[in-house]
C-alpha cells in the first residue's frame, strides 16, 4: 500500500483499516510495525477528511486513537520518532513524546524544549 492508494479509499474504508491496524498494534501482531506506519499515514488522511466522516466513523476513530495513545511506549520504542517531522496538529506522529501530546500546548512545549519549534 502507498499514499496514492490510500488517497483513493473511501472514508469508510479508511476508518475500518485504521481501527484494524491500531488493534494489531495493541495486540502486538506479527509485523505490527509495518501496520503502525500504515495506521499513521491513514490517520493523516482521516484528519484531512474529518468533516466528511459520519459521527459513528468519528467515534470509531476516537476509540482507535485512545488505543493508539495507550500504545505510545510501544510506538516510541519501535518506530517513532518519524524521520520527517509533521505539524503539531498531527499529534499521532509525536507519541514518542508521551501520551498527552494530543494537547497541542503540551506538544508545542515539548517541541520547543527540543528546539524543534520556535
Image: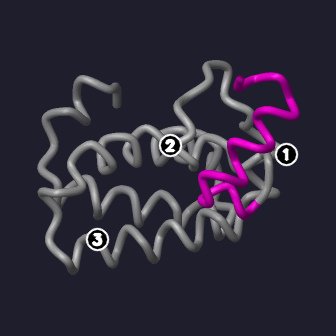
Secondary structure, mark 2, is: loop
Is disc 2 surrounded by few (<14), some (14 to 19) or many (20+) residues within 10 Å? some
Viewer-closest of 80 and 55 = 55
Residue located beneath label 3 in the image: 58
Q: Is residue 10 left or right of residue 97?
A: left
Callout 1–callout 2 Cβ contact below 8 Å: no
Secondary structure, mark 3, is: helix
**Span highlighted in magenta in the image:** 99-118
**Where residue 84 sits in the image (x, y, percent)?**
61, 19
**Where residue 116 sits in the image (x, y, percent)?**
75, 23
Q: How many marks?
A: 3
Q: Which quarter of the picture shows residue 54?
A: bottom left
Residue located beneath label 1 in the image: 77
Residue located beneath label 2 in the image: 90
Q: Nearer the viewer, mark 1 or mark 2?
A: 2
Viewer-closest of 8 and 28 = 8
The image quadrant where one finds the N terminus is top left
Q: Is residue 92 above or below residue 85?
A: below
What is the spatial separation of the Cα atoms under label 3 and label 1, in whole angstroms?
A: 28 Å
Q: Nearer the viewer, mark 3 or mark 1?
A: 3
Q: Earlier in the sequence, mark 1 or mark 2?
A: 1
**Where residue 74 sits in the image (x, y, percent)?**
78, 55
Q: Is residue 30 above or below residue 16?
A: above
What is the spatial separation of the Cα atoms under label 1 and label 2, in whole angstroms?
A: 19 Å
Secondary structure, mark 1, is: helix
Q: Earlier in the sequence, mark 2 or mark 3?
A: 3
Residue drawn at point x = 28 percent, y = 61 percent: 15
Amino acid at each position: 500500500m502507498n499514499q496514492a492508494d490510500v488517497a483513493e479509499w473511501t472514508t469508510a474504508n479508511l476508518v475500518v483499516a485504521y481501527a484494524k491496524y491500531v488493534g494489531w498494534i495493541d495486540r502486538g501482531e506479527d509485523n505490527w510495525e509495518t501496520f503502525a506506519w500504515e495506521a499513521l499515514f491513514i490517520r493523516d488522511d482521516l484528519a484531512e477528511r474529518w468533516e466528511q466522516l459520519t459521527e459513528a466513523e468519528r467515534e470509531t476513530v476516537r476509540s482507535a486513537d485512545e488505543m493508539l495513545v495507550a500504545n505510545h511506549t510501544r510506538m516510541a520504542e519501535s518506530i517513532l520518532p518519524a524521520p520527517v517531522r509533521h505539524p503539531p496538529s498531527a499529534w499521532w506522529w509525536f507519541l514518542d513524546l508521551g501520551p498527552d501530546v494530543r494537547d497541542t500546548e503540551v506538544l508545542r512545549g515539548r517541541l520547543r524544549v527540543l528546539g524543534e519549534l520556535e
